[in-house]
Structures are given as structure tokens and as C-alpha cells.
Amino acid sequence: MGEILVVGLGPGDIEQLPFGVYQLLKADYPVYLRTKLHPVVANLEEENLHFTSFDEIYEANDQFENVYETIVEKLIDSAQKTEKPIVYAVPGHPMVAEKSVQLLLANTKGIQVTIKGGKSFLDDFFQAVKIDPVEGFQLLDALALRQDEIQMSQHVIIMQVFNEFIASDVKLTLMEIYPDDHQVALVHSAGSKEEQIDWLPLYEIDRMEGVHNLTSLYVPPLALDERVASFATLQTYMDAITGENGDIWIQEQTHETLIPYLKEETAELIQAIENEDTENTIEELGDVLMQVLYHTGFGEREGYFTLEDVLTTLNKKLRRRHPHVFDGVEINTIEELDKLWQKIKAEEKREQP
């Protein structure tokens, strides 16, 4: 059947390597390393540890996904051919931001996979930047960073910022929602003898040289009034304005009394668009959105519906009406798209109670 024992090499120095993992690495098992570019490996080599590294797979592939899939295939093949268990060692902890382990667990092909532990870099990272994770934090991958997933109200840790090119991509993404001069920290080798913490403004984070395999970026949270690019901030403001102790004018409004303002703001938006006035278009779009939120605020206040009801309905509709975007349905012309939409709308009508 075969068995793979998965261990973590810890965040840095050999002193950070759990003793149980150290014993397993020294046992009489074949050892495979995702990469030997880790400080602990040199110490283990001095103790005559024999291992197989997958670094050559990185060199032969441009995409990390291909690398991890190839590693998993080779691990399973090796486990099937060996009577005794094999050891697969990865940086940090196997269950913390380790894509190859997740792929392995999802594609065992009858091989028994046992996670034997390790130490992640997170404890040392929290200590380095002096934060308490109970306040809320996000752990994100620099290689798959999405602006709309970032929670500016939380402590944000971005892994794998290992060269200036990746740092530049991260910087550009973050500067869409954070102030350019927001103070952040590049944390190198957290918890090790080589630990270094560089506090600097966000716009300077790509001024780094060389390769830094053990570098992550810490982005402190923003205060509410600084999170101006956040829809959550807008919700907070509107809840306060339309709430029981909010604006006395909006508390007197109904759907019907708000209609003239919705028409007025919509007309002003149309005029701004027709005048090709970009700045005014931005402002008027905001005013139309404000009117939408006034209506949802009234709906919540009266118990008719909530903003979440509106979002749920809209998200379901967007997903349902765009199978050519999300489900691989092939559409090549506007005519084909129109036929698809008519079909979907007809199905929606049949399903209505």
C-alpha cells in the first residue's frame, strides 16, 4: 500500500526544529525534501543525512502548480515502490500554506499519508512584529494575492515575498486600497538567529536585492476612517446613518419618498457619462449607490428585507446567468449569448412559485 510521513522543517534554524521531527529525519527512512533551500538542511547534511530534493523540478517548470503536481506524482510513485514509509519534508509546518501537501492529501491514490507535525513560522512572526492573533489576522500568498480578499481591518501577513519582482506586484496590489506611505514590515527569518525586521512605507517594499526565501510582509490594520476603499466601511457608515440613532431625515423616508432622489441622482449620472466627465461620473455613481443603500436601510428598518437579501439575490443571478464565464459553456457571438440568456430567463420563470 505504501505510506508517506509528512513533516515540517520549521521556520529557520535547527533549534526551531521539533525534536520528534528531528528523530524521524534521522531514522532509517528515505527522505524527500520539497526544497533544500532551507537553513536546517545544511545542519542535517553535516550529520550525514541523505535525501532526495525536488529542486530540479522547480528549475524545469515555469508554473508552481505544475511543480507541486509533479512532486506529488513522484512521492506516490516512490511510496508504492518501497515497503517502508518514506518521509516528505517541507519548510515550516506541513499544514500551513503548503500547497504540495494539500495536493498530496487530495490525491493519495491509496497511499496512507500521515502528518507528523512541525513548527510554522507564525508564532515567531507574531512575536517579531508584536501582535496578538486573537485580534484577527489573514495569512495570504504573495503568488496568489487578490485585492478583493484582503481584510484591511485585520493584521495581514503575506508569505513568499522572496524577491523584488514579487514585492513589486504585492506593492501595486496593496496600494490600490492602502495609503502609499502606510508603515509595513518585511520580516526575514522570523525567530531565527538571522531574524531581521525592516519597517518602511508600503511604496518602498520592492527596494530589495537578492532572494529571500524566508521573508514575509506584515501589513498592520487600518482604522475605520482610513479604510475608504472598503465596501465594509460603506456598510458601517450607512448602518449608522440609517439606524435608530442616525440621521433624522433618512428615518422619515420611505421607498416612495426616496424615488425622486433616485431619479435625480440617476439623471445626474447619465449627464456625467454623456459629458465624459470622469470625476463627476465617479461621484454620481457613488450617489446612486447611496440611494440603493438608503432603500435597503429602509427595508431593514421596517423588517421587509436586508442588504444581505439583495446581495444574495444578485450574486445568485450573476452566477446563474453567466455559465459561459463560470461553467465553460462556449459562446462565440452576441446572438448565441442572447439565445442562452433567453433560455436561462425562461427556466427562471418556470421555477418561480
Image (tube, grey):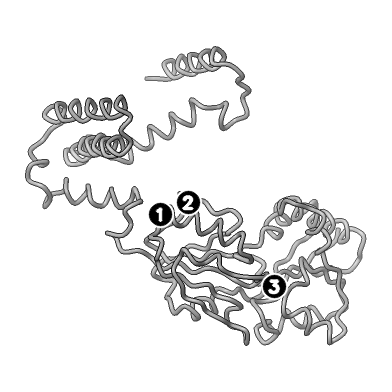
Q: Does residue 297 show up?
A: yes
**Secondary-structure class at tag 2:** helix
Q: CA distance from mark 2 to mark 3?
A: 30 Å
Up/down of 314 relative to 97, above or below: above
**Residue corresponding to mark 2:** 147
Up/down of 208 relative to 297, above or below: below
Circle 3 Cα neighbour tier, 10 Å, few/some/many (<14 / 14–19 / ≥20)? many
Closer mark to the observer between disc 2 and disc 1: 1
- What percent of the width, then of the height, locates residue 69? 76, 52
Residue type (three-letter) at the residue carrying disc 1: Ile
Q: Earlier in the sequence, mark 2 or mark 3?
A: 3
Residue type (three-letter) at the residue carrying disc 3: Gly
Residue 19 placement, left or right of 268: right
Residue type (three-letter) at the residue carrying disc 2: Gln
Q: CA distance from mark 1 to mark 3?
A: 34 Å
Closer mark to the observer between disc 2 and disc 3: 2
Residue contact between numbered discs 2 and 1, judged by CB atoms under 8 Å:
yes
**Residue corresponding to mark 3:** 8
Quadrant containing the C terminus in the rendered view: top left
- What percent of the width, then of the height, locates residue 310? 32, 35
Q: Residue 177, labelled with which disc?
A: 1
The residue at 44%/15% (across/down) is 350
Q: Earlier in the sequence, mark 2 or mark 1?
A: 2
